[in-house]
Image: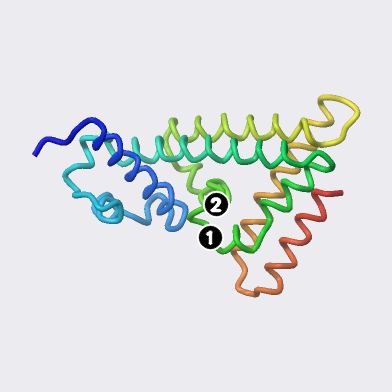
Amino acid sequence: MKVTRQRAAQNRERILDAAAQLFRERGFEGIGVADLMKEAGLTHGGFYGHFSSKDDLIAQASARELTRSLAHWSKVGERESGNPLSAVADAYLTRSHRDNPGAGCVLAALGPDVSRQGPAVRHAVTDYVRSVCDLLAKLVPGNSKAARRQKAISTYATLVGAMVLARAVDDRDLSLEILHAGRASVKG
């Protein structure tokens, strides 16, 4: 049976959605194409009609989720007129984000894995990190552009690092302490 273009586009979106979630939950190597397609409700054979390889899927799913993440960060910063940096920290360093890596930050879930990926994934992440730092540089205090950029990079590293540590420890009290300390550090 021939699949319509609209159905093919919907299937592609289902694959990208499933991949983005599962990669963040299990890592890039933690799920194979067959299981990923099963999770998307599609057959393994249909995969190559949408992507040339798993690496192609990793690159496309990563780029899409990073774009969505940047849009989210922008909205959070724009919504808060008083202290947008505080709002970003409060939105990012939460129990919900900690407990749901499949729906959260790509870098907090996959940062170390990204360094082992091909150029397409690394380029998408590089562009994303630059964009997030540019966005944060508009929100942080500083006397010069260079000082704001340095503070933005430090802030982003604090946010991602705090989330990674909060997920890594098996002590819930320590995990919450890390989230609170990260928020306090960012808020200054």
Which mark is drawn over residue 104? 2
The colour style of the image is rainbow
Counting the numbered discs, the total is 2
Q: Amino acid at mark 2?
A: Gly
Q: Amino acid at mark 1?
A: Asn
Q: Position of residue 130 (x, y in %)?
A: 63, 30
User: Residue drawn at (49%, 40%), measured in percent from left and top?
Assistant: 65
Of 35 and 120, nearer the camera is 35
Q: Position of residue 44 (x, y in %)?
A: 19, 48
Q: Are marks 1 and 2 in contact (CB under 8 Å)?
A: yes
Q: Position of residue 136 (x, y in %)?
A: 73, 35
User: Residue drawn at (47%, 52%), measured in percent from left and top?
Assistant: 24
- Left or right of 55, for residue 122: right
User: Residue drawn at (53%, 46%), measured in percent from left and top?
Assistant: 106
Which mark is drawn over residue 100? 1
Is label 2 in a helix, a strand or a loop? loop
Q: Residues within 10 Å of mark 1 (few under 14, many from 20)?
A: some
Q: Residues within 10 Å of mark 2 (few under 14, many from 20)?
A: many
Of 123 and 60, nearer the camera is 60
Is label 1 in a helix, a strand or a loop? loop
Above or below, comparing residue 47 to residue 93 in the picture: above
Inter-mark Cα distance, 1 to 2:
6 Å
